[in-house]
Amino acid sequence: MIITFYTPTLKLTGGNLIMFKYAKCLAAQGIEVYVIAPDFDKKDYIENGVHIKTFKKFPNKYFEHIFFQLIYLKNFYNLTPKSDIIIPIFFPLVIHALFCKKKKKCEKVISLFQDFKNMYWFGWYIYFILGLKYIVQNIDNFIAISDPVAQEIKEYTGREAVIIKNEIDSEYFYPRDLSKENYILFVGSSSKAKGLKYFLKAFDIVKKKFPYLKAKIVSQNNINNPDIEVINIGSDRNKLGEIYSKALVYVSQSLGDSFGLPPLEAMACGTAVVLTDTVGAREYAIDRFNSLVVPIKNSKKTAAAIIEVLENNDLRNMLEKNGIETSLKYKTQDLFKNIGKLVTIK
């Protein structure tokens, strides 16, 4: 059997981490697995038994967004081996997969749906495609990574999705015997979808009440602020687990998620979480039980929630304890069992 994944980037985004986890598990079971993506540096290689094939990425990002379907259609087609299943992990790539299916390059197209309605730039387009009956009818099945995402798929398509929930890496994210340090934490890029600017505004408010407090941001971007330490850890998941564990509060300001791994990873490390009310967060976040849930794009309420956690030790201890218990439901021990669903979906 041959299974091919389509992704719009090889960057270590949350969606790609899930995809590579699937791909490695499938390869370990003797399935031939390919990952195809645009990249600036054209290179083909094998990693953990997974064949990575890339083609030259278009240099103009704006042009790439506007003409995404047209400029990459033949690239995906030409690099795709004769496959039993093609799995696009970014919904616009179902167009490319269905083109291959029409040309008899694959038997099935299964959408690994990791998108969300208010996804910056592409959100409107994703849900436009979901409304096209011809497209939806020719997709053999959907995989939803959370219950709320499955509900959205049913709402927009009338289709029932196979649910394979995201799981965290228990090898790296677990309670550690480490002392807390005086910082709050944000993990994510500077893209608008991650809401970094709202975190920075909230930190400015909190800083006035707690002058000693620092912020750490795990990112590849630079921020010119002596009270903010930007850490680029690359793919060092163990280091990330340590950073989660030492934080007083983990803060997510995402504008939208289909699951949202970092808040759950922080919970698993025993850190209190403040996060925005996204579709994906509703899979595991319960306000005032394992987290404080705040409105999207609201720095003042985010700051108020952070201050409440910092001032109320009983609240912080409760959030930490319940967060750890919540994270136990999403450990990786069932991944091999769940991944088998991919090859049996009809």
Image: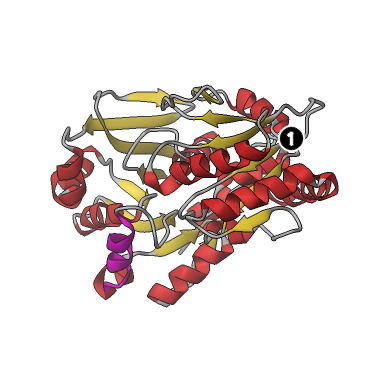
In the depicted structure, whether residue 231 falls above or below residue 346? above
Residue 243, image quadrant:
top right
Q: Nearer the viewer, residue 97 or 296?
A: 296
Q: Inspect the magenta stretch and tell me whether residue 130 lies in it.
A: yes
The disc labelled 1 sits on which kind of residue? Answer: Tyr
Residue found at x 28% / y 23% = 43
Which residue bears the numbered disc 1? 174
Percent coordinates x, y for residue 13 in the rendering: 45, 38
Residue found at x 43% / y 24% = 224
In the depicted structure, whether residue 201 falls above or below residue 238? below
Q: Nearer the viewer, residue 101 or 251?
A: 251
Percent coordinates x, y for residue 207 in the rendering: 61, 36
Residue 154 left/right relative to 62? right
Percent coordinates x, y for residue 317 in the rendering: 83, 45
Residue numbers of the magenta segment: 122-132
> Does the image show residue 168?
no
Percent coordinates x, y for residue 190 in the rendering: 40, 37
Residue 54, image quadrant:
top left
Residue 321 left/right relative to 71? right
Q: Quadrant of the C terminus?
A: bottom left
In the depicted structure, whether residue 227 falls above or below residue 122? above
Residue found at x 44% / y 40% = 16
